[in-house]
Image: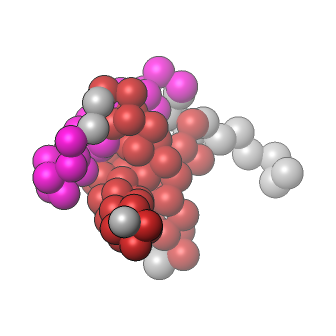
Amino acid sequence: MDGHVYGALGQPGVGFLMAIVIGALAGWLAERFTAANMGLFANIVMGILGGLLGNFLATKLHIPIFGFWRNLLSATVGAVIIITIYRAIQGRRY
């Protein structure tokens, strides 16, 4: 541990409830961008996973992510990537 306190999504100031709100919005936006048809729970899950992926990628690319809007943007980009990969894997199975 480096002595810093991190909130949800690896960002200070983003608590559990805010991570769910950002995740739901990001999942819904990603659902619209990819024309997927998922439910509310799947939107929240995809949005939270997308937030983790988006923040990881932003850290690797040295892009600072802070605040609601940047977290929402990174979570949406991450969720779109996850949905695209999921669809590619599902397409190969059938």
User: Is residue 40 toward the left or the right of residue 52 in the image?
Assistant: left
Let me know if residue 17 is in the magenta part: yes
Total numbered labels: 0
In percent of the image, x 41 and y 44: which residue is there?
46
Q: Nearer the viewer, residue 35 or 1?
A: 35
User: Is residue 41 toward the left or the right of residue 11 in the image?
Assistant: left
Residue 63 image point, x, y percent: 42, 70
Let me know if residue 68 is in the magenta part: no
Q: Quadrant of the C terminus?
A: bottom left
In percent of the image, x 54 and y 75: which residue is there?
60
Please indicate, yes or no, whether residue 70 appears anywhere in the rendered image: no
Name, please, the residue furthest toward the bottom.
61
- Above-or-below relation of 13 to 77: above
In percent of the image, x 54 and y 63: which residue is there?
56
Residue 17 image point, x, y percent: 47, 21
Q: Give, as a single range, the part of the protein colored magenta.
A: 16-37
Residue 65 image point, x, y percent: 42, 57
Predominant SS of the magenta segment:
helix
In percent of the image, x 38 and y 43: which residue is there?
47
Quarter of the image where one finds residue 58? bottom left
Quarter of the image where one finds residue 37? top left
